[in-house]
Structures are given as structure tokens and as C-alpha cells.
Image: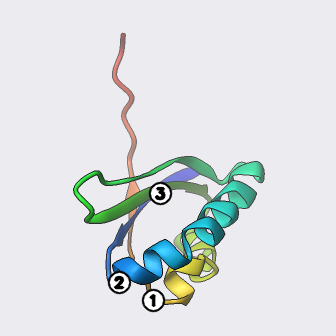
């Protein structure tokens, strides 16, 4: 599987608060299917990042299109395939 970094820039703070629990529930469901490597918010309020595991860009686009943050226009999105390199200890 490939990794895809999805930046979710803030569009509407109020909507982000309103749909936060739906967004987190959605990510938990996708994570349980093995399609999320990591996720989290940016502490400066700029938005958040989700690292998806998928075979194709189209598969990730389908996940993103179902995210409540995207559906309700609380967040925008950018998708980039990520050639991940993990540091040695």
C-alpha cells in the first residue's frame, strides 16, 4: 500500500467545532479498516493532517469525500502521495 498525506486546512472554525466528533468518529472507522497511518491537528489552528494508507489516489479521494469536515466545508483538503521514510533509531 501507498501512503497519502491529506492536509485539511481550516475553512470555518465554528463548523470545525460543530462537526469535530463526527470527523473523529469517521476517522476511527477508517482506521479500523487499516487505512489510516496517523492523524492529528495542528496546534496553531491551521487545520490538521491525515496520513492514509491506500492503493490509489482515487481510493483516498473517496475517503476524503466522505469526511464530515469536507462534506460540511469546515475544512478544505490537499492530497499528496507521500514516499515515507522512517528514521532509524
The C terminus, quarter of image: top left
Residue 3, position as x, y percentages in the image: 50, 52
Residue 72 showing in the rendered view: yes
Q: Position of residue 10 (x, y in %)?
A: 32, 75
Which type of secondary structure does the marked residue at label 3 adopt? strand
Q: Nearer the viewer, residue 22 or 77?
A: 22
Q: Nearer the viewer, mark 1 or mark 3?
A: 1
Q: What residue sits right under mark 2 in the picture? A: 12
Image: 86 above or below 30: above
Q: Earlier in the sequence, mark 2 or mark 3?
A: 2
Q: Are marks 2 and 1 in contact (CB under 8 Å)?
A: yes
Tell me the number on the disc at residue 73. Answer: 1
Vertical comparison of 33 with 18: above or below? above
Residue occupying image coordinates x 35% and y 83%: 12
Closer to the camera, 1 or 60? 60
Q: Residues within 10 Å of mark 2 (few under 14, many from 20)?
A: some
Residues at circles 1 and 3 in contact by the CB criterion of under 8 Å: no
In front of the other: label 2 or label 3? 2
Can residue 75 be seen in the rendering of this structure?
Answer: no
- Closest to the observer: 18 or 67? 18
Residue bearing mark 3? 50
* Residue occupying the point 54% across, 68% down: 20
Amino acid at each position: 500500500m501507498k501512503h497519502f498525506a491529506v492536509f485539511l486546512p481550516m475553512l470555518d472554525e465554528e463548523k470545525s467545532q460543530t462537526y469535530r466528533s463526527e470527523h473523529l468518529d469517521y476517522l476511527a472507522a477508517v482506521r479500523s479498516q487499516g487505512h489510516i497511518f496517523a492523524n492529528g491537528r495542528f496546534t496553531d489552528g491551521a487545520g490538521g493532517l491525515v496520513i492514509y494508507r491506500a492503493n490509489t489516489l482515487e481510493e483516498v479521494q473517496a475517503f476524503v469525500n466522505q469526511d464530515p469536515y469536507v462534506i460540511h466545508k469546515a475544512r478544505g483538503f490537499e492530497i499528496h502521495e507521500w514516499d515515507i521514510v522512517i528514521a532509524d533509531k
